[in-house]
Amino acid sequence: MTNYFSLNWFIIKGAGLYIPPKSSKPSTKMIYLIHNSFCLIYSCVIFTLCEVLEFGKFSSNLPSMIKIANMVMTDFLGDLKAILWFWNKKRIQKIMETLNSYSQIYKPYKDFIPEKIIEKERKIKDLITISYLVIGISVSLSACVMSFKDLILSDYQKENFNLSLPYSSFIPFNYKKSKINFGFAILFQLFPVYNFAYVFIGFDTTYMGIISYISAHLQIIQGAFKTLRERCLMELNIKAINNKVFNNQLKNPLKLQREMDKEINKITNHLQVILEISKEIESIYTLVVLCQTIVSLIVLCTCLYMISLVEAFSLESAKELAYMSAVGCQTFLYCYFGNKVRISSEMLPLAIYSMDWLSTTTSFKRTMIINMIRMQKGIYFTIGKFTPLTLSTFVQILRGSYSVFAVLKNSSS
């Protein structure tokens, strides 16, 4: 089976967030050290500082100030995600390894095939990850590409040079001196913006991938409960499935009951591991999800405001719309995967009840009831412990953004 997180690790390596294991060759460690240092120092330190230095120049121009404020907030959020990744890398990697280790602990039975459940979730997760990567890189680089096009088509005159850079930031050289200098200024902005896209996508899709894997495990646990008795019969002796003694609905033979007790304890342990992983993921990510939501709320409403100030279907409105769509997509995916886990966990009590439990012992039924009570509330990932990460929350974020935009528009008119 393909590694569930192989695509995520590929993006993390590109973002400069990958630390090779201790067993790696010294040359490999050195290559990654140089790559990581260049990517993160240039993007997260130098470029962020350049944008902060430029911020003070636009205090009298509200639209320009909004643009650079959005970029500064986004960059600081990227810096925060990079810091949190390195701070929690070992915990996150251990969670990934634990999820992998529990992916094939049940034997398949008829339609219950754990490997297919995981493979289906992996394909969905990878498709969304690739789409997110394409959107993120396209939005990040489109402004730079347009600036290069304008530069090539322009006639350079130092006295009347009115081309603008793709992003507002301090440039440590005179970029208006010549076309070549202006091209280098675009390149100066292109790489950090491109790398920030990888940082965001690597961090976000790893979180989404873990949540997706948790959802897959919950689906496996559902199937394991539903087929528990049948798989125990198959484990004891596949020929005994049609035996009247083993199919007695009033009382299970001792041999079968012991196997069923062993199996339900294994499933309960699996469920407990998933619950503990969910709590740990919540503790690692809940604050950064809160920061992401606040930034998204501000960016969405300010982008709407900027679109309302420019001509419809203009290049400027297209840029703002693309940026707003990328941020909205980012928030939507957080809520989408959180919603998947909530639905999968809420279906567990019904799956437990659906198993063939009539002929089981009192202790077996007690274990069933404990698991059903435990899963009554389901598993929720939250935004800073304030509200669950669900699709209904995403709708509330959109409504909140539009409400703030309406207030901002009315106050300025």
Image: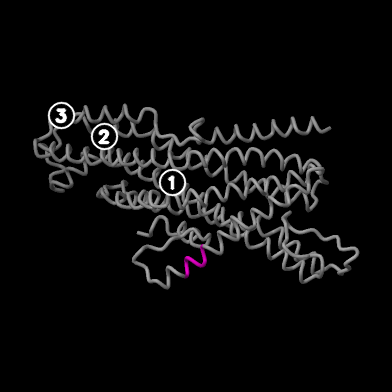
Residues under labels 2 and 1: Cα distance? 25 Å
In the displayed structure, would residue 60 be above or below residue 20?
Answer: above
| In front: label 2 or label 3 | 3
| In front: label 2 or label 1 | 1
What's the residue at 55%, 33% (across, down)? Answer: 393
Residues under labels 2 and 3: Cα distance? 14 Å
Q: Which mark is residue 355?
A: 2
What type is the residue that disc 3 sits on? Thr
Q: Is residue 241 left or right of residue 178?
A: left
Q: Image quadrant of residue 221?
A: top left
> Overall secondary structure of the magenta stretch?
helix
> 101 and 2: which one is in front?
101
Lower position in the chain sequence, tag 2 or tag 1: 1
What's the residue at 49%, 33% (across, down)? Answer: 388
Sort mark 3 into few (<14), some (14-19) or many (20+) by Cα contacts within 10 Å. Answer: some
| In front: label 3 or label 1 | 1
In the rendered structure, are the residues bearing label 2 and label 1 in contact, judged by CB atoms less than 8 Å apart? no
Q: Quadrant of the N terminus?
A: bottom left
What type is the residue that disc 2 sits on? Met
Q: Which residue is mark 3?
A: 361
